[in-house]
Image: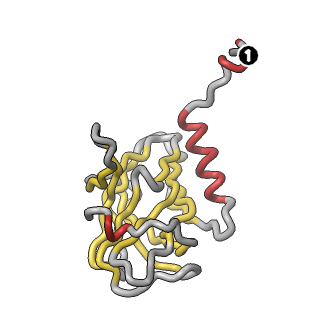
Amino acid sequence: MNARLSSFRLAPSLLALCAALALATAGHAHGVTAGDLEIIHPNILAPAPSAKSAAGYMGIANAGTTADRLIGIEVPTVARSELHTTEHGTDGVARMMHVDGIEIPPGETVLLERGGMHIMLMGLTGPLVEGQMVPGTLVFENAGRVEVEFSVDPSDGVDHSDMGH
């Protein structure tokens, strides 16, 4: 490989920032700033009309000098909401696992995205339709309670009801 090309590497935080910026420029991009934290495009991919669960995603940028931690999520239109991560077993099967919190390091952007950390919304009390805005509250250790609105974005074609939650 060309020596100049092999020496060019992007830091993981720069890659995360680029991905977050891509999210922020999406058609319905929106967000909230709370102190040093910026919540970038909180969204739910539109589930099937009969779905009992859905997944929520966003970017969280921490412009501060101290870490914060997302420790909870409240969404009044669902029976239960949890922070989850996806773990891939040695058998190649992906499993969704509940986590108590998600660390937001200083100067970093953390992405909650399909195939990684995300928010699980279980026990939907009604259908979620594309274009709808769903109120919610993110709970951080330091920043406290942050009100957000999740935009219901076009479906990813995945039925999250069948993922063993």
Instruction: Where is residue 31? Give x, y as percent.
Output: 57, 65
Residue type, numbered disc 1? Arg
Up-down: is 121 above or below 14?
below
Instruction: Where is residue 22? Give x, y as percent.
Output: 65, 53
Left or right position of 141 against 34: left
Looking at this view, name the residue that lies furthest to the front. Answer: 91
Residue placed under numbered mark 1 in the picture:
4
Residue at image location 36% in from the left, 82% down from the top: 77
Is the C terminus in the top left, top right, bottom left or bottom right quadrant?
Answer: bottom left
Residue at image location 73% in from the left, 16% down from the top: 4
Instruction: Where is residue 163? Give x, y as percent.
Output: 31, 62
Q: Nearer the viewer, residue 101 or 144?
A: 101
Residue 73 placement: quadrant = bottom left
Up-down: is 112 above or below 135?
above
Residue at image location 71% in from the left, 12% down from the top: 3
Up-down: is 127 above or below 96?
below
Is the N terminus in the top left, top right, bottom left or bottom right quadrant?
Answer: top right
Secondary structure of the residue carrying tag 1 is helix
